[in-house]
Amino acid sequence: MNIALLGYGRMGKSIEAIALDRNHNISLKATSSTKSFDFSKTDVAIDFSIPSTAVSNIKSAIDAGVPVISGTTGWLEHYNDVIEYCKSNNGTFLYASNFSLGVNIFFEINKQLSRLMAKVEGYNTEIEEIHHTQKLDAPSGTAITLAEGIIENTEYKSWTLDNPKSNEIRIEAKRIPEVPGTHEITYNSEIDSISIKHTAHSRQGFALGAVIAAEWIKDKKGIFSMKDVLNIG
Ligand SMILES: NC(=O)c1ccc[n+]([C@@H]2O[C@H](COP(=O)([O-])OP(=O)(O)OC[C@H]3O[C@@H](n4cnc5c(N)ncnc54)[C@H](O)[C@@H]3O)[C@@H](O)[C@H]2O)c1
Ligand SMILES: O=C(O)C1=N[C@H](C(=O)O)CCC1
């Protein structure tokens, strides 16, 4: 399969290594200095770029009739617009805030735990995420997905980085050099605490998940998520 990398930074390079290892070819390595994208030899495009350019990258691939997956975070206020664009152009699109297989299992554990915690009183929920200092967005896309999983099943209505109201989940975003990505959810009461935590040891898991998603989506039409790829949830 020929893969276009829309973004050739830390993630683009990790994806390239895994894609080559799985016998794929890289048809395009786009960076901020690439003027236009030539998709003529591309089967699937993978966007890991920056928040301000993700939407136009995704739409360029859809315009070219190329299935596109995006892991770029920090652009989700435009998600519905992209979905409408994809549908009206009969395109193929998959977004995941986190492509790691372990995190996608963790998303399901988070939802199941929140369903159980909704049955008892006295617990406050907090999310902590830690990433490297080059990260442009806060909170992480993964922390937002985790918060949405809790909101779906509890009385919480939204999340905040500030002092939370009683119906808000507080997310603490820490930036520490070299940390690939750590997420912890804690339920605190006066009596005890319950925590679940995912720690990425490198970017390899994100990159492997993205290549697996690209292999899965190649000949499909429509809008998908990692739950479809992994057949979970
Ligand atoms: N979903 C996941 O599993 C996951 C995992 C890791 C990172 N991310 C996200 O992926 C994104 C990229 O992360 P990174 O660590 O590789 O960042 P990075 O800064 O190392 O790389 C960004 C790349 O985007 C390129 N770029 C900028 N403007 C562009 C444009 N107009 N067209 C094409 N490319 C352009 C830059 O030149 C660079 O190569 C971030 O949003 C990050 O949060 C998601
Ligand atoms: O390195 C990053 O940036 C990461 N971004 C994603 C997020 O925002 O959740 C996934 C983890 C790594």
Image: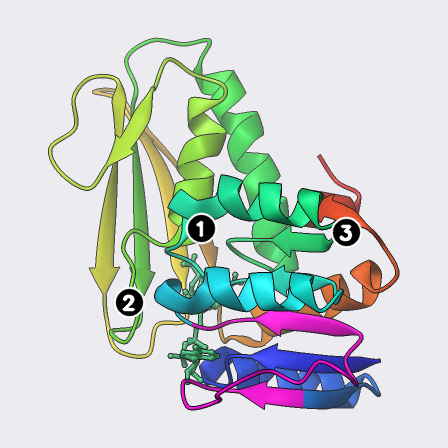
| Residue 30 is covered by the magenta coloring | yes
Residue position marked by numbered label 2 in the rendering: 136
Residue position marked by numbered label 3 in the rendering: 229
Query: Is 145 displayed left or right of 194 in the figure?
Result: right
Residue position marked by numbered label 1 in the rendering: 142
- The amino acid beneath tag 3 is Val
Q: Residues within 10 Å of mark 2 (few under 14, many from 20)?
A: few
Indicate if the residue with disc 1 has its beta carbon within 8 Å of ligand 2: yes
- Could you say where residue 3 lies in the image, as x and y percent from the top left? 73, 80
Residue segment shown in magenta: 28-49
Tally the marks.
3
Residue at 38% across, 44% down: 77
- The amino acid beneath tag 1 is Thr
Query: Is 191 displayed left or right of 207 in the figure?
Result: left
Q: Is residue 32 above or below residue 169?
A: below
Indicate if the residue with disc 3 has its beta carbon within 8 Å of ligand 1: no
Instruction: Give the alpha-carbon distance from disc 2 to disc 1, as whole Å.
Output: 14 Å
Instruction: Give the alpha-carbon distance from disc 2 to disc 3, as whole Å.
Output: 28 Å
Residue at 67% across, 80% down: 4
